Image (cartoon, grey):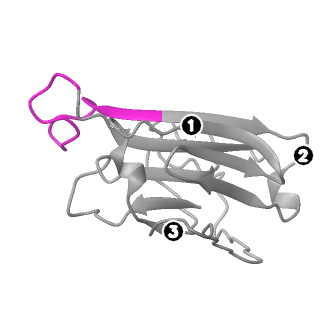
Amino acid sequence: FWSLGVNFPTVDWPRSGEIDFMEMHNAFSNERTTHFTIHWCDETVDTPEPCTRDSLPAGWIYETQYKTFDSSLGDDFHVFEAEWDEDKIVGKIDGLVYFTQLIDPATMEEFQKEFYLILNVAMGGTLGSNNQPPNGTETYPQTMLVDYVKVYQRVGASD
């Protein structure tokens, strides 16, 4: 599951910000590995218009961390968590911290704004396929089972 800044598509990606709370992709990992990644635009880079469709990757910054388990993550339900405040983003799976990123308000303002929460199964494209077309080993259809989604806001926290 992932999130995207609510100002997308008014502003180009990655200027909107993106948080991949749980991501698995075939060529770079396996059914035992999950990734937590954030994407943003560093407006301070020395380029006329950073993070526009014409200038990428100028200004596009991302930080990713991953965790590999002994068995397939598809064999059971797991609890994916994110603690996100004005200072940092922390990612967990089954209570185990595997991602921490401090938020620099000067260069990471995307993470001070609202985001959509998105749960989906995405197949195809170039991420995780090493830019190779489908080779017949893919399994269709795919299913994502979700037991519950909970969102909390700390008492006294700002909007």
CA gap, disc 3 to disc 1? 19 Å
Depth check: 61 or 54 in front?
61
Find residue 23 and name its label.
none
Residue 148 in view here? yes
Q: Is residue 61 left or right of residue 72?
A: left
Looking at the image, how many numbered discs can be counted on the residues?
3
Which-is-in-front pick, marks 3 and 1?
1
* Residue at (48, 61) in percent of width and height: 3
Residue span colored magenta: 45-62
- Circle 3 Cα neighbour tier, 10 Å, few/some/many (<14 / 14–19 / ≥20): some
Q: Amino acid at mark 3?
A: Leu
Q: Helix or strand or loop: what does disc 2 sit on?
A: loop
Residue matched to label 3: 117
Residue 32 at least partly seen: no
Secondary structure at badge 1 equals strand
| First of labels 1, 2 by sequence position | 2
Picture layout, residue 57 above or below residue 17 = above
Image quarter (top left, top right, bottom left or bottom right) of the C terminus = bottom left
Q: Quadrant of the N terminus?
A: bottom right
Residue 71 is labelled as: 2
- Amino acid type indicated by mark 2: Ser
Position of 144 relative to 59 (above/below): below
